[in-house]
Image (spheres, rainbow, N blue to C red):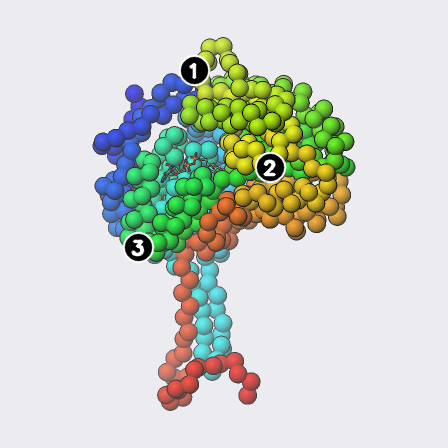
Amino acid sequence: MRKIGHFMNGATVAGTGAEADIFNPATGEVVARVAMGGAAELEAAVASARIAQPAWAATNPQRRARVLTKFVALVYDNMKPLAELMSLEHGKTVADSAGDLQRGVDVAEFAIGIPHLGKGEFTIGAGPALDMYSMHQPIGIGAGISPFNFPAMIPLWMSMPAIACGNAFIMKPSERDPSVPMRLAELLIEAGLPKGIFNVLNGGKAAVEAILAHPDIGAVSFVGSTPVAAHVYAEAARNGKRVQSFGGAKNHAIVMPDADMNMVADGLIGAAYGSAGERCMAISVAVPVGEGTAERMMEVLKPRVEALKVGPYTASDVDFGPVVTAAAQDKIKSLVDSGVDQGAELVVDGRDFRLQGYEKGFYVGPCLFDRVTPEMEIYKQEIFGPVLSVVRARTAEEALTLVNRHEYGNGVCIFTRDGDAARNFSRQVQIGMVGVNVPIPTPLAYYGFGGWKRSVFGDLNQHGPDSIRFWTRTKTVTERWPSSIQRGAEFSMPVFSANK
Ligand code: NAD
């Protein structure tokens, strides 16, 4: 059985103690076992980070960027095996895994701009013979804690800006699919990153608690479910750390009466069922405005949902694969049961989906609910599976209110041909990422990624300019030299801007 340990001080190290199974969700078989580290393993990672970080921070930013440039090239060279390794442990299609890697590489490419992105500001003559400048210095040691659903993208979102800024980094990936982060750590060393700058600590809750408590870790970036995100935010803040913590989602698509129904149906099936619905930007609620819109939408949507192909990542013609674990499969099916019990109309029922030769895989077929209401559990909870709920709204205002009242605020999309309607919606909706005829409006690397409401705890977003602010501390220097002016002692508050 393949064993996965940790990555510390530039090399893999075997785990000691507890382990967890890693499954191939397509077959239900155990394919590897991962070490479940804790405080002792973290201490070793922090020790190597502490030694390596000052020299890395003192390295010219262009030279730091050059390491990332080489790393990016190595990821492109290894795209196919990395994507296949990801699909083996996650279950999504190989094309989808390649997209996961690409979105991560996008952020590495953004972070290569660090010589420019990391510059401070300078004001000459802020007062008599007085200059003022700011600089962005690395935090020291940062940590990232990531979910199972994007095993490359999210670790790279966190680590690439952190490293580019001159920090050392400790990555705690999901215990469901840690092989790709371990491989990325090797590629970073191959690209020339000094040992100790990127470390991988494998494990679960104990590893996370150790990170939150460690006094030498100055900043923590978390992505995962909302209850854990809220806990990580509170605990890291209590321990005096900088923290950004991203949680769950329930993303709506508003379908206006003038929308192009072909575009709507294609957009909805891709965004709701792609990656088996296991994306924080998946559309899980469609809101047609007006009965006529709802009828037309269901007519186009239902046959397309029924025609979706579910299967293992090794098959080439599959739309989506299994969900990540047997526990996830059970949870999704029981939420679908609750929808039926609470009176929603299950138009397409994927609960009994079976695939010959893959009977033990964690499959859930596509499910489509109509006439869902806001009181139902399938509306309130994040299902994180291939389930789309249709909530019929009478007016555009009712649709907007529905979105704004939901506790989550990650993404939303409006399908329409009406520029006024789209513009008003974009401004009034209480959501962090908005799509206009774009069902998954995940911003590119040079913009920030982040939701509102209970989809996020903290202030600064992932990637984009916020990431440089998050992984650095700003210092402002006010400077005057003795030869330039002699004023004598001043006892009133120094003011340089008063009108004479
Ligand atoms: P999860 O919360 O179970 O796990 C996330 C991380 O937290 C993992 O590394 C895990 O080991 C750790 N963890 C789990 N339970 C813990 C506990 N009790 N105490 C401390 N640490 C714990 O999430 P998941 O199932 O891996 O991922 C799916 C969730 O992530 C969904 O809710 C999804 O919406 C969310 N997500 C959000 C975003 C975003 O940007 N907002 C992006 C991707 C995924």
In the rendered image, is residue 205 in sight? yes
Judging depth in this view, the residue of 377 and 115 nearest the camera is: 377
Q: Position of residue 349 (x, y in %)?
A: 58, 20
Q: Is residue 16 left or right of residue 328?
A: left
Q: Which mark is residue 378?
A: none
Judging depth in this view, the residue of 133 and 325 nearest the camera is: 325
Write the residue at 74% across / 35% down.
290
Q: Residue furthest top?
A: 356
Closer to the N terminus: mark 3 or mark 2? 3
Q: Is residue 54 left or right of residue 395?
A: left
Write the residue at 60% across / 48% down.
430
Q: Quadrant of the C terminus?
A: bottom right
Label 1 element class: loop
Q: Position of residue 280 (x, y in %)?
A: 52, 37
Q: Is residue 390 left or right of residue 120?
A: right
Judging depth in this view, the residue of 400 and 86 nearest the camera is: 400
Residue to which mark 3 is pinned = 54
- Which callout, 1 or 2, points to the residue nearer the camera? 2
The image shows residue 260, relative to residue 326, as above or below, that is below
The image shows residue 174, relative to residue 500, as above or below, that is above
Q: Name the quadrant containing residue 336.
A: top right
Write the residue at 77% across / 37% down.
258
Q: CA distance from mark 3 to mark 1?
A: 50 Å
Q: Position of residue 286 (x, y in %)?
A: 64, 34
Residue to which mark 2 is pinned = 374
Residue to which mark 1 is pinned = 360
**Would you say the residues marked 3 and 2 are in contact, meaning their CB atoms lie under 8 Å apart?**
no
**Would you say the residues marked 3 and 1 are in contact, meaning their CB atoms lie under 8 Å apart?**
no
Q: Position of residue 188 (x, y in %)?
A: 37, 40
Residue type at mark 3?
Pro
Label 2 element class: loop
